[in-house]
Image (cartoon, rainbow, N blue to C red):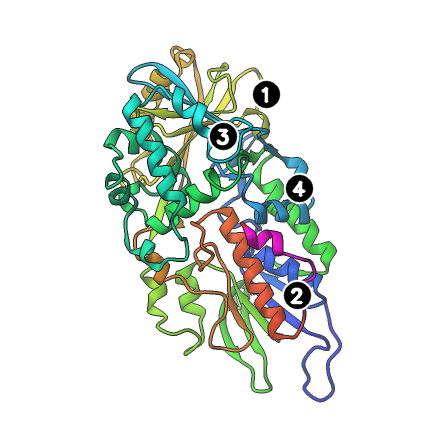
Amino acid sequence: MSAQRDTATGRPEGRTAVVVGGGLAGTTAALVLADAGLRVTLVEARPRLGGLAFSFRRGELTVDNGQHVFLRCCTAYQWFLDRIAARDLVTLQSRLDVPVLDVATGRLGRLSRAGLPVPLHLASSLARYPHLGLRERASVGRAALALRGLDLDDPALDTTDFASWLAARGQSPRTIEALWDLVGVATLNATAADASLGLAAKVFKTGLLSDPGAADIGWAAAPLGDLHDGRARTALDTAGVRTLLRARTTGIKAAADGGWQVDVETGPGRGQQLDADTVVLAVPQRETHGLLPEGAVHDPEKLLRIGTAPILNVHVIYDRQVLGQPFLAALGTPVQWVFDRTVSSGLTGGGQYLAVSQSAVQDEIDLPVAELRARYLPELERLLPAARGAGIRDFFVTRERTATFAPTPGVGALRPGPVTRAPGLFLAGGWTATGWPATMESAVRSGLHASREALSALGIGMPFDNGALEAA
């Protein structure tokens, strides 16, 4: 996309922006800036958009690298789906319903909601939850009320671990395992012992204690690549965004005449320099650290102290149906959550494709495939009787060793906001200070925050009213 040049400065006419990173954060920022009238170039090192929520081909199947879900309270991500015209590619429960099977006892319970005000919407489900005793179920209600009373803006919450807070409020190890960690590990990518109370409180207050329908679960009914790459790329093209794929950003420096110069490598021995009034850096924290100009943030070493946490996905293709519902949570087994991905992957021929999503698995992320197969296939047979004797058409794993930032106590003090000390340079990414753990919601929110600040610095308003997004 060529642009006419201002005769005085030689820079492109009109406001220009470069967004570095084509994940959800960068795509969001690029769309908002373009909608506000800026001339935007999006630079992504990979051959696709979507960041760590993507798909790839394996034979005749389209495989998601990992199972991603969202909740009804994830208003920013749902705005993103609408903006890229992908609402038709997701499923959202009409009412929360999570089947939970304890392999040790064989008992199936459900976490569900009724059509009652908070917190009564969960009372009936909790009263019938078979994986906790009567006294434990009563203690959950008291802890939930205490949780609801926490101030999410209190910085002290960031210095406390969630498990200690729960134990101090009468939560037994079994209660933490069968309820709090069942939800928390999947959303925080950490057990309660390793999670900041501030982030845990954000998850549970927003998801379970803000609105009766807040925790209703949504997931992609099509491959993630159809959403975050295909539909997103169409939306970017329509908005006039120039998208450079397989383009690695190697440097960002202030231009002598104002604005920024972004150096991009587009192939061996090939590169170009992009001029911009505004730059949004929407890449992981370590990459951000390497690209930040000197003095752009106070104590840039903080970014390197934000740890990472892995997610492992075990993919099994059976020769027949072994799971009769969209997903299942498990207790008493290493298996955490199992999802049916048969239709979305394009599998035909009467079999079933299951994805086992394993969060906070630092001790398993590098195990050989053969060892993971020997570990998980018997566990799936314990969990799903129909899998016993079923043929295995395929077994493979996907590993994201740095899937999320680690939500450890103290991480909140390390997460930077979108504004830097360098005028016209802004930060985005799920790891920045959105108040949320590392989720698709956090990534989109960060893109909204960064683009809003960038537009404000240019004296331009947001191209839409985002008050509803900021409320959640």
Image quarter hosting the N terminus: bottom right
Of the two numbered discs 1 and 4 in the rendering, the one whose residue sits closer to the viewer: 4
Q: According to the image, label 2 marks what residue?
A: 40
Badge 1 or badge 4: first in the primary sequence? 4
Circle 1: is it few (<14), some (14-19), or many (20+) Cα within 10 Å? few
The correct choice, above or below, for 187 with respect to 380 in the image is below
Q: Can the viewer see residue 24?
A: no
Residue neighbourhood size for the residue with mark 2, other residues' Cα within 10 Å, grouped as few (<14), some (14–19), many (≥20): many
Per the image, the residue denoted by label 1 is 348
Q: Tell me the number on the disc at residue 86.
A: 4
- The residue lying at 42 percent from left, 47 percent from top is 202
Residue 7 place in picture, x, y as percent? 74, 87
Closer to the chain start, of discs 1 and 3, is 3
Q: Which residue is mark 3?
A: 121
In this rendering, the label closer to the viewer, 4 or 3: 3
Against 439, is 427 above or below? below
